[in-house]
Image: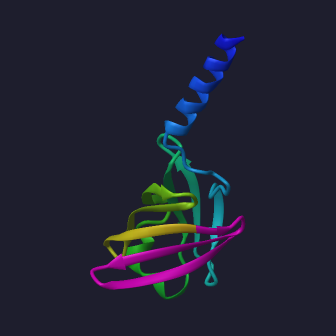
Amino acid sequence: MLKPLLASLTMAAALLAAPVFAQDLTPNGTWVDQWGTTFTFELCGDGTQLCGVLNDIQGESRTEENLAFVDEQVVAADQVAPNQWEGQIALNGGTATAKVEMIDENTLTITGCQFIICNSIEYVRA
């Protein structure tokens, strides 16, 4: 009787000690902004990193520099909290720091910062 109890307590202690991020929401899928720019996001690496491929770009961001990134992975980010990732995004011929945050099951925001200028765009699940 004591052995099963000790085994249960040992397993519970191991689970509490392991760093685990809640995966309440999944960013996997295609996302579109108000102008028609689309990304496909998926969890990658060990399952906590986020990879994003630019599918199409529309609006003022549809420049020759940015069109070169279509069909390329442009977002690489590490999970920093439940439903939040921070990393890099290819932007305007260079890179910027990026924060991707899932607001709810069908809404996420991407915030890109170059130097001290930041811009956030909301995307909805396509």
Residue at point 41%, 69% (across, down)? 98
Quadrant position of residue 59? bottom right
Judge left or right: residue 125 versus residue 77: right
Q: Seen in the image, is 86 located left or right of residue 95? A: right
Q: Residue at horizontal 42%, vertical 81%?
A: 63
For the view shown, which residue lies furthest in the left direction? 115
**Is 43 within the magenta?**
no
Viewer-proximal residue among 77 and 7: 7
Residue 84 place in picture, x, y as percent: 52, 62
Colour convention: rainbow
Q: Is residue 119 above or below residue 108?
A: below
- Residue nearer the viewer, 87 or 30: 87
Image quarter (top left, top right, bottom left or bottom right) of the N terminus: top right
Relative to 50, residue 8 above or below: above
Nearer-the-camera pick, 50 or 84: 84
7 sits to left or right of 57? right
Question: How many numbered discs?
Answer: 0
* Residue 33 located left or right of residue 91: right
Majority SS type along the magenta span: strand
Quarter occupied by the C terminus: bottom right
Q: Which residues are magenta?
A: 102-126
Residue 7 picture location, percent across and down: 62, 18
Place of residue 15 in the rendered image (x, y in percent of width and height, measured from the top left): 57, 34
Residue 51, percent from left and from top: 49, 54
The part of the image, by quadrant, that contains residue 4 is top right
Q: Seen from this angle, which residue lies furthest front? A: 2
Q: Look at 42% across and 63% down and name the residue there.
A: 86
Q: Nearer the viewer, residue 92 or 50?
A: 50
